[in-house]
């Protein structure tokens, strides 16, 4: 059981930020990554449609006998985590929202927290609700930033155009007094340095930028340790499945893992 792989999924390359953090902290674990590139972006789809996609992916991963499933996508976590927990009682799920919220609550001093994410994540108000559940006096500024995912998937990350798009979103006056900022989409760690640079240049106070990948990897490590689920496999495998093969995914995956990653195509019936 312990040496079975962990399933990880996202709409595209965003979840690689999570897969990499898990791989770094738990190097003996085999991983099966699924990127639903045929249905990307998730962020402007309805919760009902996303649930259908997610159920298919979960069934695909379970057929490959994973020991746990990481929902490496904020949008899918926002709309489907509760459903999955209630309908797949025997499966161990991890999601990316709670670890980011915990991190934000630990850091904020003035209780003013900004969060950006896809439209579906932001309009679900999942971050707002989870923060207020723990800290009712907090002030949360939520902003949907829908251009960022297609921009990152295209590999437009460190150029003039991407800088301008990021600036246009972050210059929202709502963010003026925050001290903590959540990257509420697993694609966004890829532009983390641009976000930090923007705030360094334009904010009066220091802003702590959070992404959930490392916090989530720590949570998985802790859970596996406490429950004797850690793998001792000395030759763990990394497998990558996509519902549509894209060159930018290939480039990013190679870059992340420092080796030539073999991508396999999976045909979605939807
Ligand atoms: N990376 C995902 C997230 O965390 C999905 C982005 C998208 O496909 O729109 O929300």
Image (cartoon, rainbow, N blue to C red):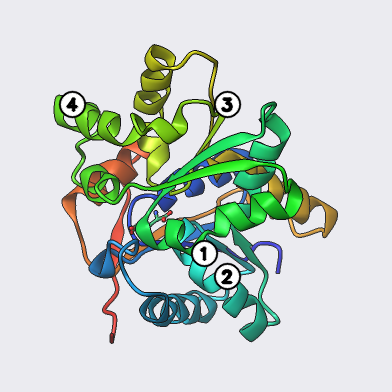
Whether residue 73 is visible to the viewer of this picture, yes or no, is no
Q: Position of residue 201 (x, y in %)?
A: 38, 13
Q: Which residue is mark 4?
A: 159
Q: Which residue is mark 3?
A: 179
Precedes in sequence: disc 1 or disc 4: 1
Q: Position of residue 137 (x, y in %)?
A: 71, 43
Q: Position of residue 212 (x, y in %)?
A: 56, 44
CB of residue at label 1: within 8 Å of ligand 1? yes
Q: Are marks 2 and 1 in contact (CB under 8 Å)?
A: yes
Precedes in sequence: disc 1 or disc 3: 1
Mark 1 or mark 4, which is nearer to you?
A: 1
Mark 1 or mark 3, which is nearer to you?
A: 3
Q: CA distance from mark 1 to mark 3?
A: 24 Å
Precedes in sequence: disc 4 or disc 3: 4
Q: Classify mark 1: helix, strand or loop.
A: helix
Numbered mark located on residue 81 in the image: 2
Q: Determine the residue positioned at 66% across, 34% down.
A: 111
Q: Classify mark 2: helix, strand or loop.
A: helix
Q: Quadrant of ligand 1?
A: bottom left
Precedes in sequence: disc 2 or disc 3: 2
Q: Are marks 4 and 2 in contact (CB under 8 Å)?
A: no
Whether residue 23 is visible to the viewer of this picture, yes or no, is yes
Other residues around mark 2 within 10 Å, as few (<14) / some (14–19) / many (≥20): many
Precedes in sequence: disc 4 or disc 2: 2
Q: Determine the residue positioned at 50% across, 47% down.
A: 18
Q: Determine the residue positioned at 27% across, 63% down.
A: 40
Name above or below for residue 129 compared with residue 173.
below
Q: CA distance from mark 2 to mark 3?
A: 28 Å
Numbered mark located on residue 78 in the image: 1
Q: Position of residue 204 (x, y in %)?
A: 49, 13
Between 168 and 72, the one nearer to me in the picture: 168
């Amino acid at each position: 059981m312990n040496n079975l792989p962990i399933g990880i999924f996202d709409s595209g390359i965003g979840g690689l930020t999570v897969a990499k953090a898990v791989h770094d902290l738990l190097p003996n674990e085999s991983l099966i990554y699924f990127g639903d590139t045929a249905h990307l972006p998730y962020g402007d789809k309805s919760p009902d449609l996303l649930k259908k996609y997610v159920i298919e992916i979960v069934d695909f991963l379970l057929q490959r006998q994973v020991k746990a499933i990481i929902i490496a996508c904020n949008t899918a976590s926002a709309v489907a985590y509760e459903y999955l927990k209630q309908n797949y009682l025997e499966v161990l799920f991890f999601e990316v929202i709670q670890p980011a919220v915990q991190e934000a609550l630990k850091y904020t001093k003035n209780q003013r927290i900004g969060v950006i994410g896809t439209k579906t994540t932001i309009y679900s108000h999942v971050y707002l609700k989870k923060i207020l559940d723990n800290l009712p006096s907090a002030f949360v500024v939520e902003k949907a930033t829908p251009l960022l995912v297609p921009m990152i998937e295209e590999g437009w990350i460190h150029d003039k155009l991407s800088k301008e798009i990021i600036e246009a979103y972050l210059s929202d006056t709502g963010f003026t007094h925050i001290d903590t900022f959540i990257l509420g989409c697993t694609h966004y760690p890829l532009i983390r340095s641009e976000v930090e640079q923007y705030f360094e240049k334009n904010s009066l106070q220091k802003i702590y930028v959070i992404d959930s990948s490392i916090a989530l990897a720590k949570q998985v490590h802790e859970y596996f340790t406490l429950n004797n689920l850690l793998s001792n496999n000395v030759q763990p495998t990394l497998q990558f499945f996509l519902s549509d093969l894209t060159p930018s995914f290939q480039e990013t995956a190679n870059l992340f893992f420092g080796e030539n990653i073999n991508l396999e195509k999976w045909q979605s019936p939807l």
